[in-house]
Image: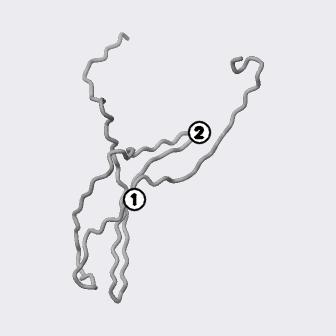
Amino acid sequence: MPQGEGRPSKTVKDWHEGCQRFYDIKLPVYSWPGVMIPPGQFAFPFSFMLPATLPGTFHEDCPAYSASISYVLEAELTSLGLSGTHMESSQIVVLREMLKEGVAPKQGEMTAEV
């Protein structure tokens, strides 16, 4: 019997809050030859491949729900010298999800009568 025909209906709300890590890696970029990090400004270019299966960045806020997928690149500098310097920084990164196989852009023209 279809809903609404003699059967009562009810609304169920289920709330979920949480975080799922899709990718977590620690990658040493540079080691100083001595124990102390010399004063100055430094740049450390680096690159690495992300898994092709990572979902793209996403955010949706509606009255009924909120959902997001986000990525953060974190950097950490630690000195083992007498000062025990420890610095951290983070940067939000936007990932574009790869197109699935067999998906190709299409060109065309759309017209409509008004």
Name the foreground residue: 112 vs 78.
78
Residue 60 % position (x, y): 48, 41
Relative to 82, is 62 above or below?
above
Is residue 36 or residue 22 the one in the foreground? 22
How many angstroms separate mark 2 from mark 1 (CA)?
31 Å
Residue on which disc 2 sits? 64
79, above or below 70, in the image: below
Label 2 vs 1, first from the N-terminus: 1
Residue at position x 28%, y 85% from top? 35
Amino acid of disc 2: Ala
Give the quarter of the image for residue 10.
top right
Horizontal and vertical percent for residue 85?
36, 81
Frontmost of labels 2 and 1 is 1
Three-letter amino acid code at the position of disc 1: Asp
Instruction: Name the quadrant of the C terminus.
Output: top left
Comparing 10 with 40, the one in front is 10
- Which quarter of the picture shows residue 74? bottom left
Instruction: Classify residue 36 as left or right of residue 20.
Output: left
Residue shown at 74% from the left, 17% from the top = 5
Question: Could you say which disc has been placed on residue 24 in the image?
Answer: 1
**Mark number, residue 33:** none
* Image location of residue 22, percent across then percent down: 42, 52
The answer to which of 64 and 69 lies nearer the viewer is: 69
